Amino acid sequence: MTEPDYFESKRFPTTDGEIAVINLESARQRSWSRFFFDPLRNGLAEIVVEHEQLTAQFVGDVSALDRLQFLSGQLAETNKPTARTLLVQAQIASMGHRFAEARDFIAQAELAEAPPADMNRLRLNIDQACGVELDRVLDQRRDLANKSGRTEDFVALGALLADMRDFAGADRTYKEALTIYQDVSPFPVAWVCFQLGVLWGELVRDPQANRAMLWYQRAVDCLPGYTKARVHLAELHSSAGRMSDAEALLTPAVSSGDPEVHWRLADVMSCKGRFADAEVLMRAARLGFESLLGRHLLAFADHGAEFYAGSGNDSCRALDLAYINFANRPTRRAFEQAHAIAVRAGNVDAAATLQVEATQRWSADAVFHSSPLKGRSETLEKGETAS
Amino acid sequence: MSDHIDGPRVIGDPAADLTDLFAFTSPENPGRTVLAANVFPTCGPNAIFSNVINHSIVVRRAKVVGFGDAAKFETDDREIRFSFRFGLLDRTTADQKPIQRGTCTLPGGQTLDFVVNDKNGASTQDGVFRVYAGLRSDPFLLAWIVGKFTKFQNLLQNDNVLCMAVEFDTQRVLDPGKGSLFAAIAETVPVSGPGAFVGFDPPRIDWVGRPEQTNMLLNDPGLPGIDDLRDLWNQQTPFAIPEALRPVFIKRIADSLANWDIRDGKQDWTPAALAAHANVRFDDYLLFDVAKSITDTSHLEIEKSTLDGHGYETGGGRTVDCNVIDILLTMWVNHDREPIHGGASTPTKLSTKTFPYFADPNTELQSVVQSIDLNGAPDAVWSLIGKFGGYWHPLIANIKIIGAGIGELRVVETVDGKQIIERLEAMDDANRSYRYSNISGIPASDYTGTLAVKANGTGSSVEWRAQYLANGQGDLIVRTIISTLFKTGLDSLKPRFGAPQ
């Protein structure tokens, strides 16, 4: 089914995005109160994690990770470690991209006889995030999605297929996630739309901006407070020279505290000749990124690298962060990012080393030959000037 | 937990999750009946209804068609339906405070508009119907760790729910002369129509008849390793569950009832009685008889008497204060041999005697205020304590600031190793005050603190104030933590600035 088919097909509404966010915030606050009232009670910490995860993902509230870190500390202090608390701690570590720490918690949980299905689900997420044995992960993801029939399992499968450059498969899977969705919460729907926007706007070799915009716009329509979708949509508007549209999208998201909003809005202000505003915003962006990197380095290393490689204008810092990111999770995308930054910085040695390492890792992999990493290496090998 | 969080699917949008259904005689007027349904378990103080769900309470006339081991009830096909729909937030009010409006469609199609959280509700002109919808204290009492069958404090202490209540003239609406026994269910069904783009006809999200059909019978925690049948059950049409699914559900209900029966080590139910009980539970609706007395203890008496082979004596139903878990466990575990009581006897708040009969929500703001008079000039005092990340408090071992300006976070490590994270909300250097919120570390919600220094003669007066939402038993802990923190901090200023004698 094509996008127009989707938009014209019979439609069923999801809860208004503003109401859903108010209810999420309401439930999030209450879940903390319940946790504090009885920290040992089964399930309460898990509910806090679920609410904070939704808040971080869909509201762009970057302090959610701070609160989760606090929760992890509380669990460590309050309880003798149990399989349950160790899994919660593993999940929190994984959300902060502290994958080695997460694996350690899971290993401890295994000793404490945690349910295998819960451990496997977490391990699968980590393996996928780190690009480990993706063929095995793919088999398991397919199995999970087919057995559960749950939207979130199809989204995870779609994301993996996109990572593995099966873009048609990813597109099909994301749309299946929408088709099987039977509920009224707007969060999963907005999530799938966002993923489809990223797929067609950023991941495919020849990005299709209009197609991506359609999906990002759907995500924002579903959930007006979806900061990440606003940022990505604004980028496309900016690229097409529609600065006012980009500004209108970004301005309401400033209150989220996400430094990427400050960054993109600063770029828009620069293009509009409002340099004083741009400077203030860029300073806020830099402070924001440094603050986040100080607290959650691994979680924001790739975003920080993008920022410093772009308007943040510090290619050394960008490359450092890109190295940190791919040392933590050596995925092809992390290599591509580091390589692109090295090329842009004119760091031929770093680019060549990355190219060699990437070739060693993935030369046997057919999809590697369509990787921008390989393409860019060849460009450099041909002696084109890096800028 | 009655029908709270009764399946993976309802967790997606908790505002669609039905918690409980009630049917009772109006405490204000015995000639009127009240039906009520609650959604959104453990919601916070700002919760609002979903705008894309049809919330219905449906009543059918019922009759007893079998007694004893052949116990059975049947219902009419004709429905008396009350449907609640809610709109988007309306920000056009004079004070710009958003409100939500709703409409109740009454039997016969008449509609009644109301404003959510308006305690007076709305009435039809002839006074036959009155409706209310809004945030209320959750009246449910769960003083058990059900899976382990051990007594506990009320696990829903201080919880709120979103409540929908309709009160009506019993004679005019139910016409009990044609039969006074009724069966009720509540359901949440997504509204179909244009507006979004999920290409799937969404089935019912949740429904509830008798309490604990899902969480304690279809997903009995005492039966490890079973498939979770709750979503499958929730998606069936009430009063019309397909015969093809009957064996699956009956078996699960019977297995669960057998499991509950032996939780105390004794078998009180004969196999035939237990099978009859499972059959009665399969026909899941809340039975109430408007010609008889409905009290806090009459819940399930209609079913019990019918299973025991004789006519019922009360109106059954379910009142707001009915302790359903104790009634259920006494029936299931003991076959009513002797009462079983949980670890608490009352919910957070009991019902009220006036409409809408569900108690006010647990949202009272609590305050802690400490102040001190000092000899030091206001500016001097402010220069020490007026920085959000200032390091002056004796109970603080370390303080770290993240970010700058409004929104910055201070991460405080206390001398006893606790961590408190607070966010700067407002800074007014000219008037020497700042306001902050607690992100984590203080066990309260909606916590706002204010620190202010004012001139007081030749010296100054420092006031430190906090407001937060009460959390029952936890409130004492919160109050002690905050009071200690404030008092110790303010007392530490005396040696620096001196204090009036």
Image (spheres, coloured by chain):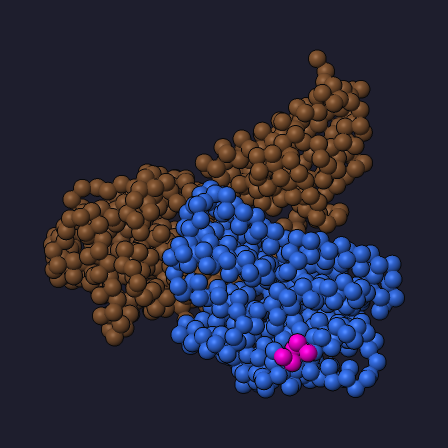
Chain colours: A blue, B brown
Residue in front for this viewpoint, B489 or B181:
B489
Q: Verify whether residue A358 appears in magenta.
A: yes
Residue in front for this viewpoint, B424 or A245:
B424
What residue is rendered at 19% in x and 57% in y? B258
Quarter the C terminus of chain A occupies? bottom right
Q: Is residue A339 left or right of residue A196?
A: right
Q: Quadrant of residue A109?
A: bottom left
Quarter the N terminus of chain A occupies? bottom right
Q: Where is residue A41 drawn, in percent x and y? A: 41, 47
Q: Is residue B110 visible?
A: no
Q: Is residue B486 left or right of residue B118?
A: right
Judged from this view, the residue extending furthest toward the top is B501
What residue is rendered at 80% in x and 59% in y? A282
Residues in magenta, as a range: A356-360
Q: Is residue B393 left or right of residue A110?
A: right
Q: Where is residue A86 drawn, in percent x and y? A: 46, 54
Q: Quadrant of residue B100?
A: bottom right
Above or below: residue B53 compared with residue B126 = below
Above or below: residue A225 compared with residue B131 = below
Q: Quadrant of residue A182?
A: bottom left
Q: Verify whether residue B491 appears in magenta.
A: no
Q: Where is residue A329 drawn, in percent x and y? A: 60, 67
The rendered magenta stretch, by its main secondary structure, is classed as: helix
